[in-house]
Image (spheres, rainbow, N blue to C red):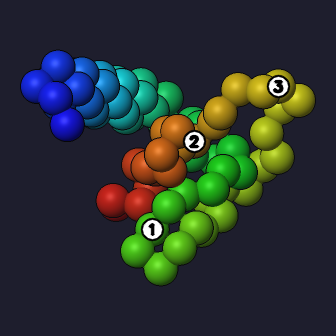
Amino acid sequence: MSRLGRLWKGAVRTWEVCREAEERRQLLCRPWEEEILHWSRQEDGWVLHGKYPPPDTRWRYGSTKWGWCPRRDG
C-alpha cells in the first residue's frame, strides 16, 4: 500500500474512533435511553436490553452504531 493510502486509512480509522467516543459521550448524557429496547454487542454475541419499545422513528436508541451500551459496562 502506498504511503498516501496508509495515511488515508489511518485518518479514516481516527475519524471512526472519535465518532464512537462522541456517541458514547452522548449516551452517557441520556441515561433514560437505557430503558428503551436496544441491541448491545457483548463477548458472547448480541444481547437485548431495555423494557420499553422504541418510538416510531429511525433514530438509534440506547447503543452506538457499533453496539456499545452503558449498561454493558456497569
Q: Which residue is mark 1?
A: 42
Q: Which residue is mark 3?
A: 57
Q: Amino acid at mark 1?
A: Gln
Give the CA distance from mark 1 to mark 2.
14 Å
Give the CA distance from mark 3 to mark 2.
14 Å
| Residue 4 figure quarter | top left
What secondary structure is found at the residue carrying circle 2? loop
Foreground of the two, 37 or 12: 12
Residue farthest left in this picture: 3
First of labels 3, 1 by sequence position: 1
Q: Amino acid at mark 2?
A: Gly
First of labels 1, 2 by sequence position: 1
Residue 8: give x, y in percent of width and height: 24, 22
Residue 61: give x, y in percent of width and height: 63, 36
First of labels 3, 2 by sequence position: 3
Which residue appears at 52% of the width and 39% of the height?
A: 65
What secondary structure is found at the residue carrying circle 3? loop
Which residue appears at 33% of the width and 59% of the height?
A: 73
Q: Quadrant of the N terminus?
A: top left
Q: Visible in this render: residue 72? A: yes
* Residue 62 circle label: 2
Crowd around label 3: few <14 · some 14–19 · many ≥20 (10 Å): few
